[in-house]
Each structure stands twice: as C-alpha cells, then as structure tokens.
Amino acid sequence: METAIIRGRFAELLAQKYLPRGESESLFVTGIFSLLDRLLGVEMKDVQASIKLSDQVGAALLTRAGPYGPHVALAEACELNSPLVGPLSASLKSACGKSTWRICQRWRGRRT
C-alpha cells in the first residue's frame, strides 16, 4: 500500500506544474490505482469494470497510454531503477517540458 501512495504522489508531482490542479490530483489517484490489480489479486480490466474511471485514467491503467500514462510509467521505472527511465523521461520531457530524468534521480535519492 505504501508503494501505491508513493507512486501516486510521484506521478502527481511530475504533473503539478504542467497540468491543471484537477488533472495533477487525478494523477495521484491514477498512481494509486495502478497497483490495485496486485493489491486485490485481480486483473486490471476487472478492476476497471467495477470502478467508473475517466478515459484518461483508464488508458493509463491498462496500457500506460493517454496523457497520464507516461507519468505512471516513469514512476514505475524509477521505483524499479529500470533502464527504461531514460527513454521514458525523454518522451515525458517532450510532453511536459521538464527534465524528468533529474526529478527521477532526486526521487531515487530521497527514497534510498
């Protein structure tokens, strides 16, 4: 559960300066919900069938697509110290105009 909250907060912080407040708050929820399948032991499509979600949140949860998907994908990659951090941060940087690589590095440092 702690990982879900951290992921949600990280995704929210990534979006805070570049998306309207409601959308960055939606990213917090999206980040938390991105782990519901594992927390509940069901497939994500079943989670989505039981909860009414916006199209943006749904796309991010199922395929890491849409406007929220890259934020959640980058949060996951940072958690795992994945080599995908570089390519994901580059694509997110073009979408939101910030150096997500530096943010991810700082986030990793804060969590170690």
Image: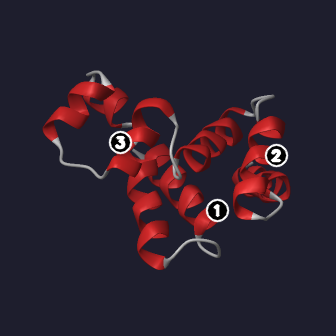
| Residue on which disc 2 sits | 90
| Residue on which disc 3 sits | 58
Residue at disc 2, secondary structure: helix
Q: Amino acid at mark 2?
A: Ala
> Where in the figure is residue 85, as x and y percent of width and height?
77, 38
Q: Which mark is residue 33?
A: none
Residue drawn at x 81%, y 28% is 83
Marks 3/2: CA distance?
23 Å
Is 59 above or below relative to 55? above
Left or right, 61 with respect to 79, comes to: left
Which of pointers 3 and 1 lies earlier in the amino acid sequence?
Answer: 1
Residue drawn at x 23%, y 33% is 47
The N terminus lies in which quarter of the figure? top left
Which of pointers 3 and 2 lies earlier in the amino acid sequence?
Answer: 3
Question: Are there few (<14), some (14-19), or many (20+) residues within 10 Å of tag 2?
Answer: some
Residue at disc 1, secondary structure: helix
Q: Are marks 3 and 1 in contact (CB under 8 Å)?
A: no
Is 98 above or below relative to 86? below
Q: Amino acid at mark 3?
A: Gly
> Where in the figure is residue 56, as x and y percent of width and height?
40, 50
Is 24 above or below relative to 105? below
Left or right, 75 with respect to 100, comes to: left
Q: Amino acid at mark 1?
A: Leu
Q: Which mark is residue 14?
A: 1
Is 35 above or below relative to 23? above
Marks 3/1: CA distance?
19 Å
Q: Are marks 3 and 2 in contact (CB under 8 Å)?
A: no
> Where in the figure is residue 48, as x and y percent of width and height?
24, 36
